[in-house]
Amino acid sequence: MLTVAAFYFNPGLQVARQAVHVAEAGKVTAAERPNPSLNIAAGYATFPGAPWVFEFLPSVPIETAGKRRHRIELANREAEAARFAFGEAAWQVRTQLRQALVDYFDSSRRIGVFRTERDLDEATVNVYAALLRAGEEPGPPLAAARSQLDTADVYLRTAEGARAASRAAVAEAIGLPVAALEGLTLTWQDYARPRPVLAPAPVQRSALLNRLDVCRALADYASADAALRLEVARQYPNINLNPAYQFEEGANMYTIGPALVLPVLNHNQGPIAESEAQRKQAADVFLDVQAAAAGETERALAAYRGALAALDDASTLVAQRTGEVRFERALVQRGETSQLSLLAASLQRAGADAAWVDAVRNSQTALGALETAMERPMDPGWALPPLTAPAAGSGGRP
């Protein structure tokens, strides 16, 4: 829902959206045919009889070698590339929003952990202070406990500031002032349950077929190919039909004849050579973008696997620390250990919770990088749809 709101409100998308409108307007320009022209002249002669002279000189241009068709093809390819560029801009907005949400929920969970640690540190200080007053414990443990309490206060204030900043980042990604989010509760039901690891083959295939930069690079190649075809067609001159009518000395005179540029000094070799080089460059760019996409996907998948393994370890540690807290609480209830032992075990449990929060954030960050590599949302419950290659003839391929 927030992504839809960002697509509607984010002003950064407007630039890419207008670029699409410009490219679509270019298709209209490319389809236009050249207008005919008409030159009308009148004169007066000094000889007697019929002194008036009139001329009507129309000119009808005729494009040859399918230039209009090639112009339309070029404009279509450029519009396609502009649409892919707009899609890239939309995905960047979604990525920015997702990272801001990760930061928000991470800082929110850290606040809970740091509050727990602070309460435990405060309870520890109170126990040491009571022991000191009773003369049963020296002062250094109390000083260390107070120092730990002060550190917990700093961590808590830092996390609260980070949550406020990340909430502002969420509003910025949507394109709204932070005041617009007041009264709204942000939820992410599956934040702590990232998607399981996927097989490399479908991930790689999805990235190569679905990434918008790969599609745009392919569209750029098709545009360069269409531009080359247009320059090749331009080596053949257009024809102008120039019929004429003259009235002179009472006589009506009619003439008709074509006019064309004689390709004797050049055959448009320069623009053709430039277009050939630009097409070769576009092909190299496509191969480079494709290789980069494959490499980025492999790295992102490996990082996500590692992050999930670390999350499993952190969850196991939390379970162990929870068991230790239960054991220490039972000992306290039986009077077999002191309250300090239970507080120490609880602090270790809080430390394990902090490690688990870090592992969740790392896994969500790694999942976001994998989604960016594939340019496809991979939320839990989503499945990769069946992927098929583009139909033959849907566009030029380098």
Image: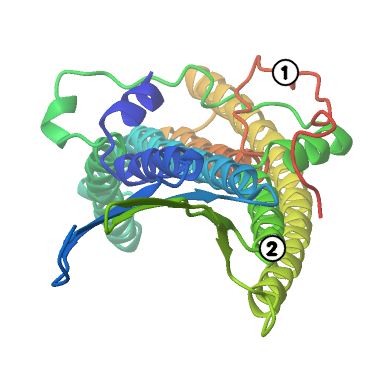
Question: Residue at image x 62%, y 51%?
Answer: 67
Q: In which quadrant will I find the C terminus? A: bottom right
Kind of element beneath mark 2 = loop
Q: Is residue 232 visible?
A: yes
What residue is pinned by disc 2? 236
Percent x, y of residue 253: 41, 52
Task: Identify the residue shown where x is 66% and y is 17%.
Answer: 382
The amino acid type, in three-letter code, at marker 2 is Tyr
Tag on residue 137? none
Percent across and percent down for residue 156 are: 27, 45
Is 190 placed above or below 135 here? above
Foreground pick, 318 / 132: 318
Asked which colour scheme the image uses, the reply is rainbow
Residue type (three-letter) at the residue carrying disc 1: Ala
Q: Quadrant of residue 331?
A: top right
Q: Do the residues labelled 2 and 1 touch (CB within 8 Å)?
A: no
> Which of pointers 2 and 1 lies earlier in the amino acid sequence?
2
Relative height, residue 264 to residue 165 (above, below)? below
Residue at mark 1: 383
* Residue 271 sits above or below residue 18 on the image: below
Classify mark 2: residues with Cα within 10 Å, few (<14), some (14-19) or many (20+). some
Residue plotted at (19% across, 34% down): 176
Task: Tell me where residue 277 appears, x and y as whole percent.
Answer: 72, 74
Q: How far apart are marks 2 and 1 (CA)?
A: 53 Å
Q: Is mark 1 on a helix, strand or loop?
A: loop
Let me know if residue 103 appears in the view: no
Left/right placement of residue 183 relative to residue 294 reads left
Nearer-the-camera pick, 90 or 338? 90
- The residue lying furthest to the front in this view is 49
Number of other residues with Cα within 10 Å of mark 1, as a class: few under 14, some 14 to 19, many 20 or more: few
